[in-house]
Image: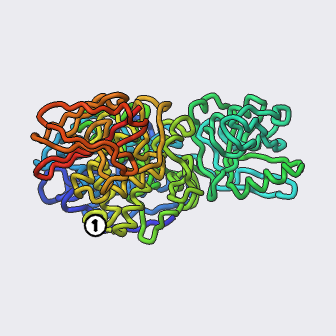
Amino acid sequence: MSDALVLDPANQDASPFGWHDTNGAPGPEYTITRGNNVIARDDIDNNNSGGVSPDGGASLTFDFPFNFNADPAEMLPAATTNLFYWNNIMHDVYYQYGFDEASGNFQDNNYGNGGTSGDFVDAQAQDGGGTNNANFSSPPDGNNPRMQMYLWNAPAGNALTIDGSLAGDYLGVAANFGAPLPEDTPIVGQLALTLDDDQGASEDPYDACDDLLNGADINGSIAVIRRGECQFGFKILAAQNQGAIAVIIINNVPGAPITMAPGEVGDQVTITAIMISQADGDAIIAALLAGEQIEGSLLNNTAYQLDGDVDNGIIAHEYGHGISTRLTGGRFNSGCLQNDEQMGEGWSDWFGLMLTQQPGDQPQDIRGIGTYATGQATDGGGIREAPYSTDFSINNYTYQDTDGNVSVPHGVGFVWATMLWEMTWDLINQYGFDPDLYNGTGGNNIAMQLVLDGLKLQPCNPGFESGRDAILEADMLANGGANQCLIWEAFARRGLGLSASQGSANSLNDQTEAFDVPQTPNCLLASTDRALLDSGIILYPNPANQTVNISVTQASGNANVSIFDINGRLIITKEISLDTTTSLDVSQVTSGVYLVQVTAQEGFIKTTKLIIQ
């Protein structure tokens, strides 16, 4: 870890009077970590009031020492300054892409630019209300949001010690549910590899995703389980129910172990669980399969807690909740991301990834969330189901995994952010990377604009399909549709292709993934879900099986209507009048997804999607 002193960081467009202004006149109103966009102060007492804000003096010099090898209380001024800095950076950067006063951003004084004032962020450092977490509450515009940053119990050393041929100490990351790692008396027991019926949910007999077959071996032992196709809480609970005294999860992708989330049943887990790396774990599994008896011990070697206030990705993530909440459904509607398939955690991860990108980064790089807070290296796996990477050997998650294979809501958001990450890197590969986040023209800047515009365009309580279609519409509006094929291909790579369906956005059990893309010129396609991309065509019923009615609201006179399959083959063509509703016989058309294109005079061309059942 390292730190740097940054000079005059305020952006003149977003914060024209500097970060310490509140009256819109030259000169700061505060010399502490308070200003128009945020007040940063400690909340060690967990009372949401008072607290200390470090003072930079008349020169506004906030040069406080960091000490990353001591108790976080010893660097509270530096940590609070970092919290102030990153809240302002998030405000200033995303201001450029449309999170401004009129859209409901967070400012005490809106300087006459619209919106409702009086809602700067209350950012609370080293909050005493919890551990191993952070949060951001965002009420409607004009009401102050609150960011609470907690301390983390991260492993500073090796949590697992074993004997035998592989004797040594091994890095382990504790789950954020169940019993914590003991700090004084270790958990000691024989390691036992779980064996399950591999004819069910998973083909891996060692991932505890199906009924366990060797309960006698597990009883009284430390269960060894490979990460696999089911939630962490499910497999750990299965071992617990067979009498395991603790669990070691073996990562199934390269890189550092990650912090495991509970999933749907993790709240029933009462034993300790850690994850170790794939390389370490595969060697242990091989030794156990060879018949070796291995004793292990689990102990928390953490000397001190770590401070989320200096994990920049976590700060950006939490602020991102404010952006997605204020933009989805409008600045006065703070309840539009409450449905089961909402992607709030995903946007927040992506916001953090975008602001911590560096020149020279590659799409296949491992990008973990919360690596500092959990004591991992910068290339560690982080706290999600997998690190972010376009490499499927590192992150192979697709849309269908949202149906029970990931945690809710963080795992669901993780899958969405994985899709956004694919799109971002495709745009960077097309247009290059620009380190200027304020005025740059690179693919990363284009991605930031598309995502912010998409948040504004999507409906309240969106699902994945709605979110994707809003981004496609954003590209139509901002770029004339120049990136339609690129966007489709990025989402389709992760299962949100043309034929995919979110079903109800209020359910995580009715999704259908698909990997196809439109086979039309420039991949132009409308959304049947909301008719945002080309709202001029109304098809009903849709899905259809006998006839489909076509009504066009943005043109008149005669037109040609053509129906193509997804490979671009013409199925039906007919001349119609746009002055009335026309019925087409589709009874002889086989089930599938089709494109309906209406072409009229004066360049009117509209395309939408039709499903035949």
Q: Total marks drawn?
A: 1
Q: Residue at x 43, y 35 (%)?
A: 591
Question: In the rendered view of the protein, which quadrant contains the C terminus?
Answer: top left
Q: Taking the image as drawn, is residue 605 in sight?
A: yes
Q: Nearer the viewer, residue 399 or 125?
A: 399
Residue 214 appears left or right of 90: right
Direction bottom: furthest residue: 360
Q: Position of residue 259 (x, y in %)?
A: 59, 47
Q: Position of residue 69 (x, y in %)?
A: 57, 59
Q: Position of residue 185 (x, y in %)?
A: 76, 42
Residue 481 appears left or right of 340: left
Q: Residue at x 45, y 29 (%)?
A: 507
In the image, residue 68 sits, relative to residue 492, either above or below, namely below
In the image, residue 391 sits, relative to residue 505, either above or below, namely below
Q: Residue at x 78, y 39 (%)?
A: 195
Residue 22 appears left or right of 449: left
Question: Could you say which quadrant of the image residue 142 lies in?
Answer: top left
Q: Position of residue 47 (x, y in %)?
A: 40, 34
Q: Residues within 10 Å of mark 1 (few under 14, many from 20)?
A: few
Q: Residue at x 45, y 43 (%)?
A: 413
Q: Taking the image as drawn, is residue 456 in sight?
A: no
Q: Nearer the viewer, residue 332 or 600?
A: 600
Query: Which colour assignment does the render follow?
Result: rainbow
Which three-letter amino acid code belongs to the residue tagged 1? Answer: Gly
User: Badge 1 is on which residue?
Assistant: 440
Q: Secondary structure at mark 1?
A: loop
